[in-house]
Amino acid sequence: MKVITRKRRRVLGEDDAEDEDEEMTEAERQAYAVAKCASMVELCEYEPDEALKEIKRSMFQQTDAWAESNKKAIKSAKGKLRQAIKSLDLVRGTEASLVSEVKVLKQDLEAITSSFNERLEHQRSKQERVWAAKLAVKEREKAEYEVSYLVQFDNEYKVNVRVKEFIEEKGYNPDTLEPFPIFP
């Protein structure tokens, strides 16, 4: 499909520089995705609630980005389709060629639309699975920390009570460590 599109661009006289720019932006997107993933892992460790908000926002941004690129592709294809229709009205002699061009553009539009829909669905489901698993792990860790903290607190409280009782038995005030006054 890509080879056919490139050949068509060459025939129509369109520049191949667009393909190079798209590859560059794809590499930049990959680098951004890696950096974003690293920051999200760190955020999940320290602030799981904030991480959940960030995950949802990121998913909506990615969905919006896919939708925007889909809209741009559709708009571009519609623009080409309009140009082909205008040419058909102006030049009746080349009607058969323009009709076939319109069909090809419609097929391209359908292919682009289905491709973007598939990618969008795949990306969404992948993100849901990954972040749901990470969130579950963080929730388990949080519960374990709460339990261990409560046990530690209870143990420290019991030790403090025993120490105070021991100091009182020896005849000292546990708050000031001074001997209790002796009343006759």
Image (tube, rainbow, N blue to C red):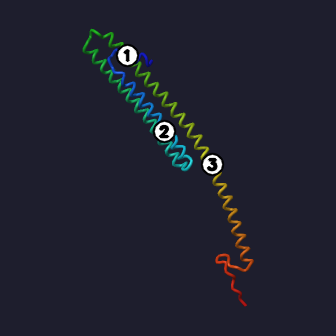
Task: Determine the secondary structure under disc 3.
Answer: helix
Dot 2 corresponds to which residue? 59
Dot 1 corresponds to which residue? 8
Q: Could you tell me the amino acid type at mark 3?
A: Glu
Residue 93 image position (x, y, % from top left): 27, 8
Dot 3 corresponds to which residue? 141
Q: Could you tell me the amino acid type at mark 1?
A: Arg
Residue 35 image position (x, y, % from top left): 49, 40
The nearer-to-camera label among 2 and 3 is 3
Task: Using the numbered discs, state the Cα–Cα distance from disc 1 to disc 3 in whole angstroms.
Answer: 56 Å
Q: Could you tell me the amino acid type at mark 2?
A: Met
Of the residues under marks 2 and 1, which one precedes in the sequence?
Answer: 1
Residue 1 image position (x, y, % from top left): 45, 18
| Residue in the image at 70% along x and 73% along y | 164
Task: Determine the secondary structure under disc 1.
Answer: helix
Counting other residues with Cα less than 10 Å from the Cα at mark 1, is it few (<14), some (14-19), or many (20 or more)? Answer: few
Of the residues under marks 2 and 3, which one precedes in the sequence?
Answer: 2
Q: Are marks 1 and 3 in contact (CB under 8 Å)?
A: no
Residue 18 figure quarter: top left
